[in-house]
Amino acid sequence: MRRIIASISLLAAVIFSGYALPVYAQFDPFNQACNGVSGSTVCEEAAKPQTTSSNSLYGPDGIITKAIGLISIITGIASVIVLIIAGFRYITAGGDPGNITNAKNTAKYAVIGVVVTLFARAIIVFVFNKL
């Protein structure tokens, strides 16, 4: 029964997702709020022509772009630290099969984390280039 409900929900989401986008694209929540207001950051941003290079959210100097870069750097540093810890655990395992397996699993999951981070960053860059 749960699979049927999940399937119907997924099907409805796919079918009706095409109808929500045009309505969202036509709705401008700041249109009325920015009339006669000057000096507001939101209104100034809404008045600028929105291109990929000038967008302050996902442009080259955008907030989201900087946050993604920072998260990628933190993930890279964390993975290197975890790989060093895994190597140290492997060296100090002393031939114990359980400790060796734990060290190998730690290294494996650190590498998987790096790969997932790289793919996520590639997907985000691809999506931002399509906006």
Image (cartoon, grey):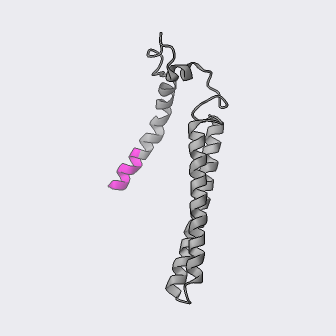
Image quadrant assignment for residue 64 = top right
The picture places residue 66, in percent across and down from the top left corner, at 60, 42
Q: Which secondary structure class fits the magenta region best?
A: helix
Tell me if 27 is positioned left or right of 61 in this view. Answer: left
Residue lying farthest left? 1
With respect to residue 1, does 63 lie above or below? above
Find the magenta span and give its range: 1-9
* Residue 57 in the image, given as x and y percentages of width and height: 57, 34
As for residue 38 lying within the magenta part, the answer is no
Q: Exactly how many numbered labels are in the figure? A: 0
In the image, is 55 to the left or to the right of 30? right
| Magenta stretch: includes residue 8 | yes
- Given residues 123 and 59, the one toward you in this image is 59
On the image, the x and y values in percent for residue 110 come to 57, 66
**Quarter location, residue 9:** top left
Give me the residue at 56% from left, 72% from top.
85
Which quadrant of the structure image shows residue 84?
Answer: bottom right
In the foreground, 69 or 3:
69
Q: Quadrant of the C terminus?
A: top right
